[in-house]
Structure formats: structure tokens, C-alpha cells
Image: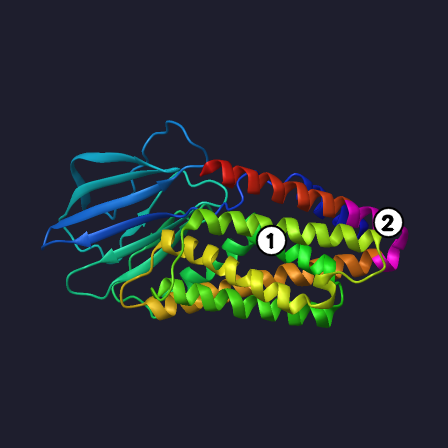
Amino acid sequence: MIRAFLCMIATLLAAPAMADELRPGTIELIQQNEKNWSLAWKQSLSAPGPAPLIVPELPEGCAIVGEPVKRNASLALLGSANVQCVSDVAGGQIGMAGLLGNSDVLVRVQPLDRPVQTLRLSAAEPRATIAAKPSASQVWTSYFGIGVEHILMGWDHLLFVIALVLLVASPWRVVKAATAFTVAHSLTLVATVLGFVGTAQRPVEAVIALSIIFLAVELARQTKSEKPSLTERWPWLVAFLFGLIHGFGFAGALREIGLPEGEVPAALISFNLGVEAGQLAVITAVLAIRFGVRKLAPQAEGVALKLATYGIGITGAYWLIERLVGW
């Protein structure tokens, strides 16, 4: 238990410079007539710089006509091509080779005579089968998985949740604060995706980094003073206010992923449920580890908490500077 807590602290101190590792790729295969399809895809990159364009794997009986067109985008390559299929794509496999780490690819297949279907590729399962009749659960499972990964791999949101749990500590107060955070980011996520509100993404990302610094400062004050800090007194209020900002961040990620036409409510709800599932898993793990350390080695808790505080604060400050300079 002690080792697990120390590993968590070490992970925080070694948090990656890129705050949000969720940059999913996309593949769109759209039928134009009996034999011709259009293929467009986005290949996510882990870092800027030259990289070869990976061409998606198509179902048997389908082939690209001519040379694919390649374009550069921010941390991504965009490809497009014309495709001819001499047989039905139903039952065939579509995939993307070379997926690494946390890379995901959302696939959208749009035949002329059947409903659109959404598939999800990952490094563990880089190929998926195109169904003759897509199930209603496709969108739900795909976007739920993306939501879980967004909170677990999006380090800025993850650090905010961890800092909040470390600061509040009491399970019941953590539940109330987490509920307020959930309600708040759900409101701005839905409002932004549906077009009721909108804001520039760069200021949002800067304020998210600032929210992490704020909680780190609150944690530092907690270890030096017996007087309750603002967040200790009103954790649900602080979580709600910053949750509104984090919701804009979630919306930006979902906007980059894209929403399937005709399935926007299902995709939106399942993505949000995935975010909440990941968030609850993190909260449960942090509370369990801290409780275990407090019982087994109470003398180590203060040192570990101080290491976590400085690790969170330094990381948040780095992201804030990086995002401000990026303007």
C-alpha cells in the first residue's frame, strides 16, 4: 500500500508535458455510388515533426484508386483518397496499423442503403468488423470508452481531481465535491456541444492549468496552517466553479473527436458517463491508497502529501506558462 502511494507520487512528479494525451484519429468511409467510396482519415502524432502517412486497411474487395492526398495539421496528418469496392463491405474489416500507446481511432462507415455505424480502434484492437446491420450499442460503447480514457489520460483533468481528493480527504465531502464538479462540467459540455455557448479553447486550457495551481496552493496551506482553507470550507463550490471551465475543455476534446450524425444524444451521454466512470475510479483509488497509508504508516503520509503538492503545483505552473506563451 505504501509503495502504491509512493508510486502515485512519483507518477505525479513525472507527469508528461502534454496535459491531454487524448488526440484520437478518425476514419470516414462514405459510399458515393454502387462501387465508389470516399476515404478520409486523421492520423494523430505524438510530437511535431515529419512522419509517414499510415493508410487505413480496407475491407477485402476494396482498393484505393490513385495516390492518397496528404495534408499537415496540428499534431496530425490528414489523408484522403478515392476507393473502389467490387464487393459488399459488410463483414469486412477496417483498421489502422501502427497504433501505439493511448492512440484511438474512431471509424465512421456510411453506406448508401444502410444506417451509419461507428467503430472504435485501439492499439489492442487495431481492426474492427463492419456489420451488415449495426447494433444500437456501437455508439454507446465507443464514446463511453473514449470518455473513460479522456479522464484517465488527460493529465490536466486528472490532476485536478487528484488534488481535490487529497485536499478534502473526507469520503463524504469528496462525494459532494465530485458531484458538484460533475454537474458543472456536464452543463458546459452539453451547452457547448449543442451550440448554446462557446469560448476559445486556449484561454480555457490556461484556466484549467490555473485551477490545478490553485488547488496545489490550497494543499500547501493546509500542511502549514490549522485554519481551514477556502476549498476545505466550501469544496463543492470550488469544484463547481472550476468544473464549469473543465467542461469547456471536455467539449473541446469531443469537438475534435466529432459526433456521429443522428446519434448526437447517445454519443454525448455515453462520453459523459465514461468521464464519470473514470473519475470515480480515480477518486476511489486515491482514497483507498491514502486510507491504507494512514493506517499502516501514518508517519509517511505528511511527506508523501508534500511531495504530491509540489509535484501537482509545478506541473500546473508549467502548463500555465506553456499555454500562455503559446498564444
Name the residue at 79% across, 63% down.
Answer: 228
Would you name the residue on which mark 2 appears? Answer: 300
Question: Looking at the picture, which amino acid does disc 2 mark?
Answer: Ala
Q: Residue furthest top?
A: 50
Residue 211 marker: 1
Looking at the image, is 204 positioned above or below residue 168?
Answer: above
Q: Which image quadrant is residue 73 in?
A: top left
Closest to the observer: 155 or 121?
155
Q: Position of residue 323 (x, y in %)?
A: 50, 41
Name the residue at 56% across, 42% down.
Answer: 320
Dot 1 crowding, Cα within 10 Å, few <14, some 14–19, many 20+: many
Q: Position of residue 273 (x, y in %)?
A: 49, 67
> In the rendered view, does 213 fall on the left or right side of 297?
left
Q: Which image quadrant is residue 230 in?
A: bottom right
Name the residue at 76% across, 46% down.
Answer: 6
- Secondary element under disc 1, as helix, strand or loop, is helix
- Secondary element under disc 2, as helix, strand or loop, is helix
- Looking at the picture, the colour scheme in use is rainbow
Q: Which image quadrant is residue 291 in?
A: bottom right
Q: Position of residue 12 (x, y in %)?
A: 67, 44
Q: CA distance from mark 1 to mark 2?
A: 27 Å
For marks 1 and 2, give the one nearer the viewer.
1
Looking at the image, is 7 positioned above or below residue 91?
Answer: above
Q: Residue furthest left?
A: 34
Asked whether residue 297 is drawn in magenta, I would say yes
The region drawn magenta spans 294-306
Prevailing secondary structure class for the magenta stretch in the rendered image: helix
